Amino acid sequence: MKIKKKYDVVIALIYLLVLTICGFMIVYPLATMNKIKIGAFDIISIIISTLLILYFTFNYFSINYCLDDKNLIIKSGLSKETLKYKGIMNIKKERKFISTTITSINTVCIYYSPYGKKNDVKRYYLSVKDSEEFINQLKEKCKHLKR
């Protein structure tokens, strides 16, 4: 079952600011090409800026969350994380300003340990449209979590 993600204006504006800065790094060397010889730095900044714009845009729009029978699947850009339900230690709502897989400030934090060890816990921040419904669905799948 696919889960709808939430988009916040603040996060979208931050991404837009980053893309604008990257765009300026592309346009500036091209605008000064006629006056000054184009150098290696100009070419490198154009390539890096273009790659950053493509990365941020692709990452922002390709985030998906899916609940299947045994796993929570998080897709972001080219990466895919599969969290087994038995490894989920805790779920709670949090406010997180920036993370790689979020599109909203209000997030659901999942504490995950693949081997059940308390000293080996990773945090995953998800931006879901209806966090209460998502938490309830996840708790139904994770029988070991407290209701």
Image: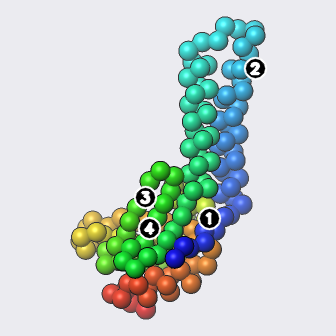
Circles 1, 2 touching at the beta carbon (< 8 Å): no
- Rounded to the nearest angstrom, the CA distance separating label 2 from label 3 is 39 Å
Q: Mark 1 or mark 4, which is nearer the start of the sequence?
A: 4
Three-letter residue code for mark 3: Lys
Three-letter residue code for mark 4: Ile
Circles 3, 4 touching at the beta carbon (< 8 Å): yes
Three-letter residue code for mark 1: Ser
In the image, what residue occupies the spot 75% across and 10% down? 34
Three-letter residue code for mark 2: Ala
* Front residue of 77 and 131: 77
Q: Mark 3 or mark 2, which is nearer the start of the sequence?
A: 2
- Image coordinates of residue 147 in percent, x first then y, are 43, 92
Q: Nearer the viewer, mark 4 or mark 1?
A: 4
In the image, what residue occupies the spot 40% across and 79% down? 69
Which numbered disc covers residue 73? 4
Query: Is residue 94 visible to us here?
Result: no
- Image coordinates of residue 62 in percent, x first then y, are 57, 56
- Rounded to the nearest angstrom, the CA distance separating label 4 from label 1 is 19 Å
In the image, what residue occupies the spot 37% across and 69% down? 83
Is 34 left, or right, of 73 in this rendering?
right
Q: Quadrant of residue 91?
A: bottom left
Determine which residue is flagged by label 2. Answer: 31
Is 117 left, or right, of 23 in this rendering?
left
- Few, some or many residues within 10 Å of mark 2 (<14, 14–19, 20+): few
Is 131 left, or right, of 66 in this rendering?
right
Which numbered disc covers residue 80? 3
- Few, some or many residues within 10 Å of mark 1 (<14, 14–19, 20+): many
Determine which residue is flagged by label 1. Answer: 104
- Rounded to the nearest angstrom, the CA distance separating label 3 from label 4 is 7 Å
